């Protein structure tokens, strides 16, 4: 992929397009030997692209951070994993342009950072990047899944486990002969796990991990917490302390270790969000809006940090988000301001 393949001046509504544009801009800065942390060195076109939306700026910041982390990986390790990710036989492989190689290396580095560094050991020791020798490719299964705004997708993993990804969700998967580890980077996913006593099935988000004990469970990533709903079987949830949840139970674990228990938001083998219903009980309004943004093309922001901590309880449809936003003005001292696709909540 070269910069000719993507018009980096267009807004681009699809999250994947925005990520590609951000990556190409980062490569442009690298090739021109410009510091991506110094916006005073940015080309005018990049400055205009960043000014188009908060999503552009947030994505560029995320890509820049991943770039900084990926440069700490052992180059030989990245090369070996690049070879593994490229499954096309060498005899059929076409020569790649330098820009394409840079993009592929950067994408592989991002995946390696998430699958190696962001999966911490169960201990509380600080996370470190270790230049470990590559595991033989025949023993590793790695994949990255992503859904756009407002869309769901069900995928089958290497062990026949099923994962249904909610809207605007990113999930990295890494299997070996001894473990099945998944990193939920953002969004929400429902896991229907195939039993394999020899390989634990572990989902990680921030400092929390969820280990399946042969089960169906849902994990939702909030900015400062993770929520786990169990529909079948049992799971062990660990952060500072470990707890066990059984069918029909749910828990939200905050980054400070605080645990809030509740009932699961699903019946049988399906979650309410799969039917288009978003359900919240004593949830932070900031978390609700973070979740809602995955189902709307609107750019929703809260101008006052205090508003994020208001408590919300209720149910609404993903097809009625605009009406729901308007209703907030009757529930809270909030005023909803609209300007095109931009929605800002301010204190009233």
Image: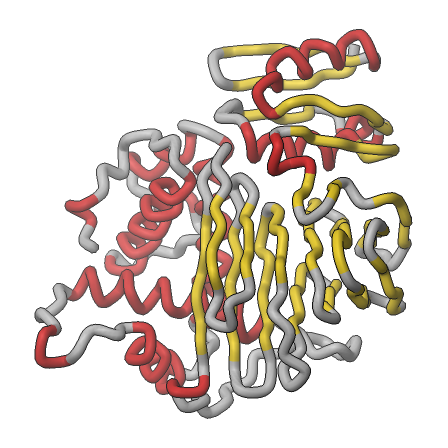
Image quadrant holding the N terminus, namely bottom left
Residue 329: x and y, percent? 76, 9
Residue 330: x and y, percent? 80, 7
Residue 201 drawn above or below residue 148: below
Q: Quadrant of residue 272?
A: top right
Looking at the image, which is closer to me, 184 or 219?
A: 219
Residue 136 drawn above or below residue 328: below
How many numbered circles are shown? 0
| Whether residue 228 can be seen here | no
Left or right of 49 on screen, residue 268: right
Residue 156: x and y, percent? 47, 61
Left or right of 231 on screen, residue 143: left
Residue 195 drawn above or below residue 265: below
- The residue under the point 12% across, 73% down is 93
Residue 51: x and y, percent? 42, 30
- The residue under the point 68% across, 82% down is 197
- The residue under the point 67% across, 16% down is 325
Left or right of 113 on screen, residue 77: left
Q: Quadrant of residue 108?
A: bottom left
Looking at the image, which is closer to me, 63 or 341?
A: 341
- The residue under the point 31% across, 48% down is 25
Looking at the image, which is closer to me, 24 or 15?
A: 15
Residue 277 drawn above or below residue 244: above
């Amino acid at each position: 992929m070269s910069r000719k393949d993507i018009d980096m001046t267009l807004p681009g509504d699809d999250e994947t397009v925005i990520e590609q544009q951000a990556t190409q801009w980062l490569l442009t800065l690298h090739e021109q030997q410009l510091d991506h942390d110094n916006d005073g060195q940015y080309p005018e076109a990049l400055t205009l692209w960043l000014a188009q939306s908060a999503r552009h700026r947030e994505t560029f910041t995320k890509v820049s951070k991943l770039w900084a982390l990926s440069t700490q990986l052992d180059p030989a390790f990245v090369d070996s994993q690049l070879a593994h990710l490229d499954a096309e036989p060498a005899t059929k492989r076409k020569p790649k342009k330098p820009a394409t190689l840079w993009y592929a290396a950067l994408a592989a580095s991002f995946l390696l950072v998430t699958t190696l560094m962001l999966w911490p050991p169960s201990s509380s020791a600080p996370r470190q990047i270790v230049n470990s020798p590559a595991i033989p490719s025949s023993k590793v299964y790695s994949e990255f899944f992503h859904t756009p705004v407002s869309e769901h997708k069900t995928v089958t993993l290497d062990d026949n486990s099923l994962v249904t990804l909610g809207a605007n969700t990113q999930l990295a998967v890494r299997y070996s002969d001894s473990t099945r580890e998944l990193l939920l980077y953002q969004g929400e996913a429902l896991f229907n796990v195939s039993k394999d006593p020899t390989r634990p099935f572990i989902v990680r988000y921030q400092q929390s991990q969820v280990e399946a004990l042969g089960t169906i469970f849902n994990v939702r990533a909030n900015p400062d917490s993770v929520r786990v709903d169990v529909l079948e079987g049992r799971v062990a949830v660990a952060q500072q302390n470990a707890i066990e949840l059984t069918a029909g139970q749910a828990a939200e674990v905050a980054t400070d270790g605080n645990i809030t228990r509740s009932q699961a938001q699903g019946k049988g083998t399906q979650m309410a969000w799969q039917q288009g219903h978003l359900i919240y009980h004593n949830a932070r309004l900031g978390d609700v809006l973070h979740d809602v943004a995955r189902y709307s093309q609107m750019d929703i922001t809260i101008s006052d940090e205090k508003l994020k901590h208001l408590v919300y309880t209720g149910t609404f449809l993903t097809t009625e988000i605009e009406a729901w936003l308007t209703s907030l003005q009757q529930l809270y001292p909030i005023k909803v301001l609209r300007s095109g696709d931009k929605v800002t909540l301010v204190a009233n």
